[in-house]
Image (spheres, rainbow, N blue to C red):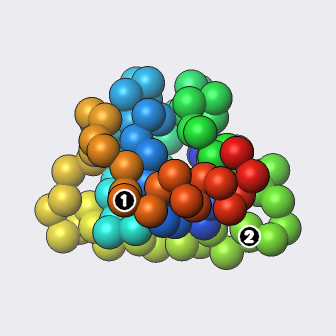
Amino acid sequence: MAHVVTTKCLGCKFTDCVEVCPVACFYELDGQLIIHPDECIDCTACVAECPVEAIYVDHAVPEEFNASTEFNATESLRVKAAGQEAITSKKEPLPTAQQRKAELGY
């Protein structure tokens, strides 16, 4: 079992979640974060840290975000194979983060 970053993260890329991850399973794309499903230990530490509630356990992803499960798996394998390291420290969110957060109702 693993957790999934949904498209709620798209345009935000808050990185509060990566600092509490004990196994460094988050990877960074230009517009959002993703979780490597084989590295996630399902500890749930990241869930409460996301300001836009973008992270779900894989078997409880809302239907509207189902594509995010495959996207996390595919993209995390791709970026790791390309030599990208996991993100482990907090960075500034995207410039559009506060606007996106408001659009999502947070």
Residue 88 at x, y = what percent?
A: 28, 36
In the rendered structure, which amino acid carries the disc numbered 1? Answer: Pro
Looking at the image, tell me whether mark 1 or mark 2 is earlier in sequence order.
Answer: 2
* Left or right of 60 in this view: 90: left
Vertical relation: 90 (above or below) 32: above
| Disc marking residue 66 | 2
Image position, residue 6 (x, y; %): 62, 60
Disc 1 element: loop
Residue placed at 31% from the left, 35% from the top? 90
Kind of element beneath mark 2? loop
Task: Look at label 2 and name its amino acid.
Answer: Asn
- Residue 67 x, y percent position in the rendering: 67, 75
The residue closer to the viewer here, 42 or 20, is: 20
Q: Quadrant of residue 49?
A: top right
Task: For marks 1 and 2, give the CA distance.
Answer: 26 Å
Residue 56 locus on image (x, y percent)? 69, 47
- Residue at the spot 70% in from the left edge and 45% down from the top edge: 106
Q: Which mark is residue 95?
A: 1
Q: Residue drawn at (19%, 59%), measured in percent from left and top?
A: 84
